[in-house]
Amino acid sequence: MKTIELTVKNVRKAFKEADEKGRKLLRNLCGEDVFSSSITDRVRSYEDACEELDIPVRENWEGLEKD
């Protein structure tokens, strides 16, 4: 069985361009929260925020200057 990986960004773009049948399919596959317009529904962690902003997750915080 093949596995298909999709980015949230691409799934949301497809959702915006889809007709109602396509949107229903995407909701069933990905879950309703992926398409929520409320930021608090989509962003629950640092990793979610990075994904929302389309920036890489920083794993190593060493070497950064402190305020």
Image (cartoon, rainbow, N blue to C red):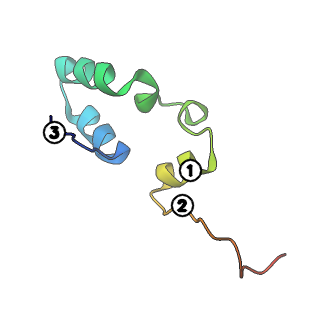
- The residue at the far left in this view is 1
Amino acid type assigned to the residue bearing label 1 in the image: Glu
Q: Secondary structure at mark 2?
A: loop
Residue at the disc numbered 3: 2
Picture layout, residue 30 above or below residue 47: above
Question: In the visual, does 8 lie left or right of 26?
Answer: right
Do the CB atoms of the residues marked 2 and 1 lie less than 8 Å apart? yes
Considering only vertical position in the picture, is 21 above or below 51? Answer: above
Q: Residue furthest right?
A: 67
What residue is shown at x 49% (from left), y 63% (from top)?
A: 56
Q: Nearer the viewer, mark 3 or mark 1?
A: 3
Image marks 3 and 1: residues in contact by CB distance under 8 Å: no
Query: Residue 14: image x %, image y %?
Result: 23, 38
User: What residue is disc 1 on?
Assistant: 47
Alpha carbon separation for disc pair 3 and 2? 27 Å
Q: In percent of the image, x 44 and y 57: which residue is there?
A: 54
- Mark 2: give few (<14), some (14-19) or many (20+) Cα within 10 Å: few
* Quadrant of res 1: top left
Task: Choose between 67 and 59: the one closer to the eye.
Answer: 59
